[in-house]
Image (spheres, coloured by chain):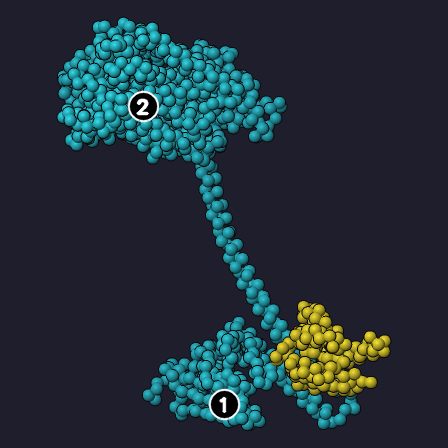
Chain colours: A cyan, B yellow
Amino acid sequence: MLSAWFVILASFGYIGLLFAIAYYGDKRADAGRGIINNPYIYSLSIAVYATSWTFYGSVGRAAADGLIFITIYLGPTLMFVAWWFLLQKILRICKTNGITSIADFIASRYGKSTAIGSLVTLIAVVGITPYISLQLKALSTSLTVLLEYPEIVMPSAEIGLPVVSVTAFIVAMAMAVFAILFGTRHLDPSEHHEGVVAAIAFESIVKLIAFVAVGLFVTFGLYDGFGDLFMKAAAKPELQKLFAISPSSDYAQWVTLTILSMAAILCLPRQFHITIVENVGTDHLSKAVWMFPLYLLLINIFVLPIAVGGLLQFPAGNVDPDTFVLTLPMSTKNEGLALLAYIGGLSAATGMAIISAIALSTMICNEVLMPALLRMDSLRLNERGDLTTLVLNLRRFSSVFVMLLSYGYFVFIGESYTLVTIGLLSFAAAAQFAPAIIGGIFWKGATAHGAFVGLGLGFIVWIYTLLLPSFALSGWMPQSFIAEGPFGIELLKPYEFLGLTGMDNISHSLFWSMVVNIGSYIWVSVYTEQSAIERIQAALFVDAEKFSGTTGRSNLWQGSAAVDDLRDLLYRFVGSYRTEQAFKDHARIRGLDLDVLMAVDAEFVAVAERLLAGAIGSASARVLVASVVKGDIVSLDEVLQILDETSEVIEYSHRLEQKSNELEIASDNLRKANEQLQELDRLKDDFLSTISHELRTPLTSIRSFGEILFDKPEIDLSQRKQFLSVIISESERLTRLINQILDLAKMEAGSMDWEMSEVDAREAIEEALVAMSSLMADKSIALDLKLPDNLPHVFADRDRLIQVIVNLLSNAVKFCGGPEPVVRIAAEIDGDTVLVRVADNGPGVPDGVEDIIFEKFQQVGNPLTSKPRGTGLGLPISRQIVEHFGGKIWFEKADGGADFRFTLPFTRNFQIAE
Amino acid sequence: MSHSVLIVEDEPNIVLSVKFLMEGSGFDVRVASDGNSALKEIKQAPPNIILLDVMLPDRDGYSVCEAIKANSDWQDIRILMLTAKGRDLDREKGLALGADDYITKPFSTRELVARVVEVSKELAVSYSHGT
């Protein structure tokens, strides 16, 4: 059944299916209903990473070296799971700046440099060509093997080559046609090829299904599950080494390969193209960070089982392990599965070849050919009409060129290598981009010179340590180049450069190329100056977050351009529809009227340049825009000024933020202060209300009796005397009250005039008693006095001290009661103070008011009699006085009656011994 | 007939003057020095007019006013509040509780007498109409 014509028919049937899917995808996209705008398709398209290297080569590698094949998937997994922010930043930069390829990215970062763009393109083309040819080799090998069915015969140079090379050539050209048809249908500023992406996602499904199917067949068809398979393998000593990492040699290689594949997922032109350029929704990345690693995991589960199964099935060693995926189904005459495996390999190879061709042709056209043609004044390209066709034709030509080059490499060199070796060669080339990319998005100081020298030297080391030896091994150069070094110089041996031994070829090359690449990149960057445009681009890339979604103030252009010139320029590359659309959008945002607009400003020019860059790359766009803009590219001084202004604005906004925080705190404080003020206001209101009441009460009596005496001169003398005495006593009360209020106000304000001196406390007490004696006698109050003779002097204002004692005494007199009212006064030495006690046998201080009786106007009524007489200011004043003397006043809870106490410190020179 | 006046006031000197003025105007005068004894006096024999101080030692004049107005037997009693609290707020509170008039201390003796006499006349008219 597996006749040649059937296999060929199936191959072209499959490729036809791809064309159909791509066609459908493009039609849907044109209708505005794209099918690729979801994270699943996006993740599947990134799986273009899994090529025939994965499909056939991993098994080959596993059969030879065991688990180390997994490193090629460990790197990308690490990148997506742990370093996704790197991808995110690059994605954001590319969306903001309309980046079309990895070469455009690097060139754009380093001042839209044509030289760097060309160098990156050169490295990419030279580095990736072997990789594409690897796909052709895998394809032709698998086809040759399948065509020998039911025999299992390995292709040899003698018998296989003519048929195989013709097939490979036809496939290569089919891929070029595919890339041309769907990659260069029109010039799209966003560089999106929805049909291609849809086809690639489909291919990812096919190769996964095919590989897993073969894996299941080997594990559960040929053997009785994983356990059975590995048991049988473990019985063979030569297979045991496949399940372990051999401790001595492999660790360095594990690390190297993991790093290499990490760099590859970022730096391979096709990965950059599919992950970054073709991305239609930045949020898709958040799903891809786990779905893509999951895909890699799934496609790797059966690598070791297939490898082990192959080694067990073909113990003679006459079957190339790179073909196990195909030959295992063939060996059991499983035709359907063999065909599926072949189609899976076909899908892995074509996917890689198509995207690589598109990515490389875009780079060749945008970074090398267009800038070169535009600079050839004799062509007068700037003055020609529609250039879209020219650009597209250049790309078409480039696609064919890339595929022809790969085919050439395949024919002349590819035969002498395993799949993995060729793949790693390309990985090592792509890894040269990593320093310029990662440095470029985190280090503003990196210069174009640094990037150019780093890339260039790294590339040269790569050529010397990997590419030239591969030529030598293929017989293009003498083998002695490897064995003895050029001209017999041992130190220059490409695999043992400067005598560095003990490393595998890839690690060795990566080590030297990275040392040279990174070293010169940093060194030259530090010692060279950036041009104006580099400064701008560096800021745009490193501070991508700030500039995201806007061209900001970092415009390259100053001066203006005529609208019509700009319009004509864009018409030629992106067409009238997109041009008008973009102009209208920008005019609307800016509030400009396109109909009357004659010239546009720098910001408008920047928008146009971005649109153009999307179509033909930033380096070409810069050259073209320069031709229509009147005015110069800004000078370095102006760039510095712009950057300073930007940072000033940022600084200013930081300060504003800080200020607003401070304001918030201040307003919070104000609110609290306001609450306190309101509380104070309430207290003041209460205070005034109380004072008002206390003043009005004696005034009422005085006024009433005054008016009575005035109105009724006829009232008799004794009554008149009574009324007059009320007037007098109420006047005294009023006077006392006013004095107390004034005293308290002065004390609280700190403006009281104190006459401090040494005072004999005993004398002061006695004097106060004299003042109170008549009142006490009137109420027949007994006095219990305990005054020691040797009381030391205290430092006080004598009159105020007497005032305190009088206050306390009058309280005691007021409250003491019972049939035998008594007031007790005592003084004693307590530490270095004199302690004075004034107590009575009244009802005492009620519970719950202890804290407030020293506050103003907090009178405590005597429940037995009536409202207390007094101003309510006595105790507060007493406290102010005592505290001014350095003592304190309080009261003790006593059985029956109040017990007020206060202390007065001795004068400083008093000695108890005296 | 002469109307009876109950003076509710804790300041003895103010009692002395108001009592003198009321007696001089021909009223029957009784005195209570706090809220509770005032209510006791009213229970014994409701006066026609009460001169009610607000700041009393036990319960304030407002609550005494409220207690009187809450008793249906005492609806005819006219209440004049006498207070040293001069704020509008206090005045409104007193009137809202049903006081008939509100006089701020220190007051003019003539005005006090005139207002009490006025209330007394209103009382005489309402009695003669049998309300």
Q: Is residue A88 left or right of residue B23?
A: left
Mark 2 Cα shell of 10 Å, populated few (<14), some (14-19), many (≥20): some
Instruction: Tell me which chain the residue with mark 1 is part of.
Output: A
What is the crowding at mark 1: few (fewer than 14 residues within 10 Å), some, or many (at least 20)?
Answer: many
Quadrant of the frame with the C terminus of chain A: bottom left
Label 2 belongs to which residue?
Answer: A212
**Residue A485: which disc?**
none
Residue type at mark 2 is Val
Depicted A865 relative to depicted A448: above or below: below
| Quarter containing the N terminus of chain A | top left
User: Which residue in the structure is indicated by mark 1?
Assistant: A823
Give coordinates of residue A744: x percent, y percent. 54, 76
Question: For the residues marked 1 and 2, what is the alpha-carbon distance in whole angstroms?
Answer: 109 Å
Q: Is residue A462 left or right of residue A866?
A: left
Placement of A583 over or under A721, stated as above or below? above
State the residue in front, A727 or B58: B58
Query: Which subunit holds the residue at mark 2?
Result: A
